[in-house]
Image (tube, grey):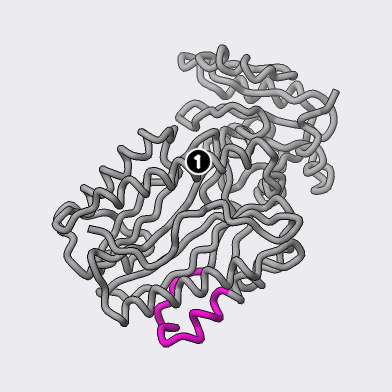
Amino acid sequence: MTDRYEPFRRVAREASLDAIALVPGANFARLFEKEFHQNERPLVVVIPAEGQPAAVVPNLELASFEAIQFEGEVFDWRDQTGYQAAFDQLLKSMPISSIGVEGQVMRVFVDQALRSASSNLAIQDAQQQIAALRLHKNAAELEAMRNAIAISERALANTIDAVKVGMTERAVENILVQNLFAEGAEDFAFPPIVAAAENSAKPHAHSRDDYALAPGDSLLIDFGARAGGVCADITRTFFVQHCTDARADIYHTVLEANLAGHKATRAGVTAHDIDDATTKVLEASAYADRIRHKTGHGLGRDIHEDPYIMRGNEEVLETGMVFTIEPGLYELADMGVRIEDDVLVTDSGSESLTTFDKSLTFVG
């Protein structure tokens, strides 16, 4: 019988740690194929380098926790008595002196509960090593991601068909949200970004309810569905009815950079290589001063995860990795353009999982 905990045991051994702790999040969901949400009640699974795992679980979650068919001992606790005794019992049952945690996910009060249970316990941030276990997407994750992207692209097509001059950004966002759930989204991958005109020059803009779309405006839409536990992430920039030649040139510069990133992607190259190929196109243009971010980020159960596609990251890309290619150019107080695809590294090169049209498109 396969030990589903072995990858985490291996991380512990390679880092000279006695155990790994997981809390609800992307790594937890991939291991147990069930999602639990972080809240004020700590839920922690401790996986030793050798031996059976153990867990601290809120009593009210026991029925749900049983569904993951956990192999180890469970120490439950109730609101009326608090959780510290459960942590004490777990560490008493498992003689460990060092533990690796998810530094970007573990919360301070859980860290404190572990330290209170064992004053000599050494806690180490093992975020990078643990997250690396998700670098290569499995078949189920890829199937779910293709579905999430298809949902997103159908929703986007239906949304831009409904865009009209005079609509507010918020109205367009509301249409997009309705279309996402109508097409089968289980949740947002992240809050959608719908930004027009000068607002589109802010890479993480919030939609406005006091600005009406006008002819010639840029309209940037960055969003994604979450379905099957994974995320889609797609950005397209449109123009309302028409655009100037200068803005069309900016758009085509970003598109050229996007295509250069695709062309550079294959197993064996580094994240640096892809960002370099993409960014060089932008740097060689008349708009080099409008570059404001790296080329992309890993995508999967988290909306942002390894590998990060940026200069200086010499991580070698391998078959099964998924990340975004999303060059952009932004002129503050004027407009911005971003074109984003989700890309899979394959044995023969790469595959763009996003297929939505990238040609210059007018709406309204």
Residue 5 image offset from top left, x and y in percent: 77, 31
Residue lying at the far top of the rendered structure: 63
Q: Quadrant of the N terminus?
A: top right
Please indicate, yes or no, whether residue 174 appears anywhere in the rendered image: yes
Residue type indicated by callout 1: Ala
Q: Position of residue 226 (x, y in %)?
A: 48, 39
What's the residue at 44%, 32% (across, down)? 186
Q: Residue at x 26, y 62 (%)?
A: 196
| Residue span colored magenta | 278-294
Quadrant placement of the C terminus: bottom left
Of 243 and 136, the residue lying toward us: 243
Pinpoint residue 260: horizontal percent, then vertical percent: 58, 73
- Would you identify the image quadrant in which residue 262 lies? bottom right
Relative horizontal placement of residue 134, taking residue 48 as reference (left or right): left
Residue 209 within the magenta-colored segment of the rendering: no
- Res. 111 visible in picture: no
Instruction: Give the residue number, with chain letter if any, for mark 1.
Output: 148
Q: Secondary structure at mark 1?
A: helix
Image vertical order of residue 189 relative to residue 331, above or below: above
